[in-house]
Amino acid sequence: MSAPVPDTYVADDPAGAYPLVQLLTPEGERIEHADFAYTGDDDSIRDLFRDLYMMRRIDFEAHALQRHGEIGLWAPAQGQEAAQIGSGRALRPQDFAFPTYREHGVALCRGIDPALLLGLFRGVELGGWDPAEHGFALYSIVIGAQTLHATGYAMGLTLDDAVGHNDPERDAAVIAYFGDGATSQGSVNEAFDWAAVFNAPVVFFCQNNQYAISAPIERQTRVPIAQRSQGFGFDGIRVDGNDVLACHAVTSAAMQKARNGEGPTLIEAYTYRMGAHTTSDDPTRYRDSSEVETWKLKDPLERVKRYLMVNGTPQTFFDDLDAEGEELGRHLRAACKALPEPDLAALFDQVYVDGSPELEEQKAQYIAYRDSFEGTPA
């Protein structure tokens, strides 16, 4: 039997010491904030809605592919679209993002063909894109490890004199994505400490989707996650993670602060995972359906759609988007089924740039073992 939640627990209190930054209500109404603003016009909001829609379609198609046995696993992100698209579209080309295994929307924002995400989950490759080309690292399966990678990269930017010049073409920053459960990992707290001490140009973007697999947020912390940064000496901000405009505004400000050489920021995007942790998870075992229904009223896509419809966006825009989504679905299904079977011997060539004698020996042993089965009756 679980222990009672302490009376002092305020981590799920959006109106507490760290109120949510919100610019678009669940009803689709624009509101003002004293410190943050989204400056784009309605055309830019339509672009954001397209990203939100396509991210959800990627999620839908990949989930279906897993259920049809075409990929082994998928990490759904339904409900977290605004956090990813809002922050992803706040990045400049020279910035660098370090994802977990769920940042499908950020990958989309960084110009990666969504089909390239499927190879990892099909088990045929370690990652299908060039991180340097897209400013987007390969997915990190190890919980929290990417925050250390991001901090190291950010420290490198400082050493390379790539921050603090007030030059939008030169100054760069880093963003590290992770979930609420990762904040309990030592790696994340070590990254916070190093980033603070070295004033690294990094933004830590926590998608607090309320569950670390089955462990609810109240089992992770007694205070808002955004407050954690204070113990390390840098700022924390809490944003409505289902509000794409607010996520864009807050991330833009934090990234610019980092590019200016003013150090790290922790952003807690308060959101909700509508589906399972992965396709091997059954969320009905640890949360009530009524909770999910409550969060559906805060759907990140619906609030933007309401705003656009009220402000004159024609139905043809949404119809065209549906057609584009169908085409994306066909592309993903075809690309997944066309993935070649991997040459497992090639995995040994992906460990180090120059290889090593030990790896060559291991590769030779594997090839000899594999070839020993040739001609063996099934």
Image (cartoon, rainbow, N blue to C red):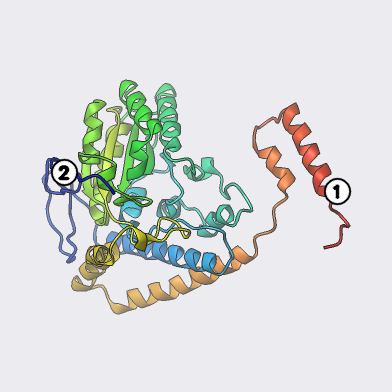
Q: Residue furthest right?
A: 375
User: For the residue marked with disc 1, what is the amino acid?
Assistant: Ser
Q: Is residue 196 left or right of residue 31?
A: right
Dot 1 or dot 2, earlier in sequence: 2
Marks 1 and 2, how far apart in space? 61 Å
Please name the amino acid that badge 2 sits on: Val
Q: Residue at x 19, y 63 (%)?
A: 26
The image shows residue 303, relative to residue 20, as above or below, that is below
Residue at x 45% of width, y 36% of height: 145
Q: Nearer the viewer, residue 215 or 73?
A: 215
Front position in the image: 25 or 171: 25
Residue 288's spot in the image, x, y percent?
28, 63
Tell me residue 82's x, y (percent): 31, 56
Q: Residues within 10 Å of mark 2 (few under 14, many from 20)?
A: some
Residue 62 place in picture, x, y as percent: 50, 64
Q: Quadrant of residue 42?
A: bottom left
- Left or right: where 166 falls relative to 32: right
Residue 10: which disc?
2
Q: Residue at x 58, y 50 (%)?
A: 128
Binning the other alpha carbons within 10 Å of mark 1 as few (below 14), some (14 to 19) or many (20 upward) gives few
Q: Is residue 302 left or right of residue 276?
A: left
Q: Quadrant of the C terminus?
A: bottom right
* Residue 40, image x, y percentages: 25, 55
Q: Which residue is mark 1?
A: 372
Q: How many marks?
A: 2
C-beta proximity under 8 Å, tags 1 and 2: no
Check disc 1 and report its element: helix, strand or loop: loop
Image: 3 above or below 342: above
The image quarter in which residue 312 lies? bottom left
User: In the drawing, what numbered circle is on residue 225?
Assistant: none
Going by the image, does 89 lie left or right of 224? right
